[in-house]
Image (tube, rainbow, N blue to C red):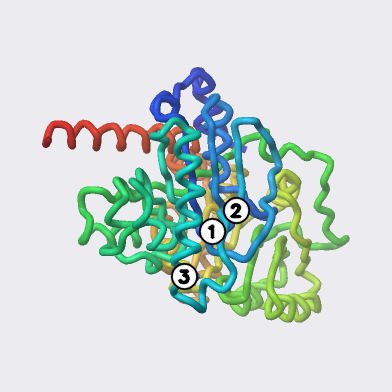
Amino acid sequence: MFPTPTDSSPHSESTPLGYYRERGGVIFLSYCRFWDRHAFVQQALAKKLVDAGIPVTWFDGVGWRPYSPTLYWNSPLLDVRQLPAMPGRRFSEGITTLSLDLQWRTVEKKIREHGGNPVIWVQGGIEEGLAERLPYIDIFSTFDDPYRHQPHGALCQKASQILCQNSFTLERLKSFLPDKVHLFLPPLELGEHVYRDTRSRFRLPREFPEKIMGYIGSFGSLGFDLPLFERFVRELPDWGFILMGRTDREGQESLNRLRSFGNFYYQPWAPRDATRDAWRQLDVSLLLYRRLASQDGAFPTKVSESLYFGTPCVATSIPKTADLEGFCPRESQPEALVEAAIRSASTPPEKLRKAFQYFAEKSDPLRYLQRASEILQSTKSQNQNNG
C-alpha cells in the first residue's frame, strides 16, 4: 500500500478550513442518495469538515422516495436527513409547486440556523425549481449524469462555481460557462484507517490459479461489461478471476454462468473496511465499464483504490475513463484489452506509485475542500474588484 497525501503531510491535521468556519458551515443538497449503506465517496467531505469543528447539514436524496440515511459515524455537528417532499408531485403541477415551496422553507430555516450565510453546496443536482428558490448557490458538483442539468438552467446559472468529475463534463460545460467550471476528481478517503477490518478474510478455493484479475465493487449489467469479463475468464484459464460486490438480476444470470468455470470466484458485497484482503489478492483490476449516457460524467474511483494497493488497472475506452489516459491502458477492442491486462501485471512498482500519487492528490478530501474554498474566495475578490 502506498502512502496517501495526508499520510505524508506532517501538518495535515492542523490545516485550517477557516473559510467554511467563517461562513457558518456547509449545507449540502443532493438529488441522489449519497448516504445509503453502500455509499462512501462524497461523505468524506462532511467528515473532514465535522472533524475540523465545522457544522454540516446534508439534505440527501431529495428526488427519491422516503428513506432513512445510513450514518456510520455521528457527531453533534452533523445533521443528515432527507429533504421533505409532498406525495403526488410528479402528477400535478400544483403539488410540485407546493412541494418545492416546502423544501425551500426547510432549507431557509437551516440557513438561519447556520448564521445566515453558510456555503450552499449542491452535490449531483436538485430540481431546477428548488435552485430558482435558493438565494444563492456556491458550488454545484456534477455527478455521473452530465446531461441532467443544462448549462442555461437555474442550477448551472446560479451556481458560483461548478466542479466536474471528469474531463468529458468539463469540456461539455466549458463552452457555455468558461469562467466557472473546474475539474475536481471525486473526493476519496484512502489509508490504513479506511481498510481497518483485518479480521475479514477472502478465502479462495483450493487449486485456484495464483495470478488473479477481477473487480471489487458494484457491477450492474448495464454499466459493467459482464460478457467481456466472461470472455476474459474463458480465454485465460491459467488466470483466476474474482468479482466482489452487488449486481442486478441480469448480473446474477451472468454469475450463474461464470460459476461453471473453475477459475472464477464470486464474493458478495462487504463494507469497504472489510475489503483489504480482497484487494490484496488482485494482480490486475479490470475496469470493464460500458458506456451509458447517465455515466458519461462519472470518474472510476476504483482506479485510486486499486493503485493504493499497488494493483495495475486496464479499462475500456469510454468517457467515464478518459482521465485515466496515460496512467493505465484504455482499449476499445476485446483482444487488445486482454493483451493489455496480461502486460499490466508486470507494471513496475514505481510507475504504479507515481500514478497513485497523482490520483490520490487530486482526490484527497482535505485538499479538495481547500481548493474549493480558494476558488470561492478568488471569485468573491474578483466580484468585489469588478464592482
Q: Is residue 89 above or below residue 301?
A: below
User: Horizontal and vertical percent for residue 333?
Assistant: 47, 76
Name the residue beneath numbered marker 2: 82
| Residue picked out by circle 3 | 294
Measured Cα–Cα span from mark 1 to mark 2:
6 Å
Which residue lies at the image location 31% right of the left edge and 57% below the top edge? 156
- Residue 344 vs residue 10, the one in the foreground: 10
320 with respect to 243 (left or right): left
Q: Amino acid at mark 2?
A: Gln
Q: Residue at x 54, y 58 (%)?
A: 62
Can residue 170 be seen in this snapshot? yes
Element class at badge 2: strand
Q: Residues within 10 Å of mark 2 (few under 14, many from 20)?
A: many
Residue positioned 48% across, 33% down in the render? 114
Badge 1 is on which residue?
A: 62
User: On the rendered structure, is 119 left or right of 300?
Assistant: left
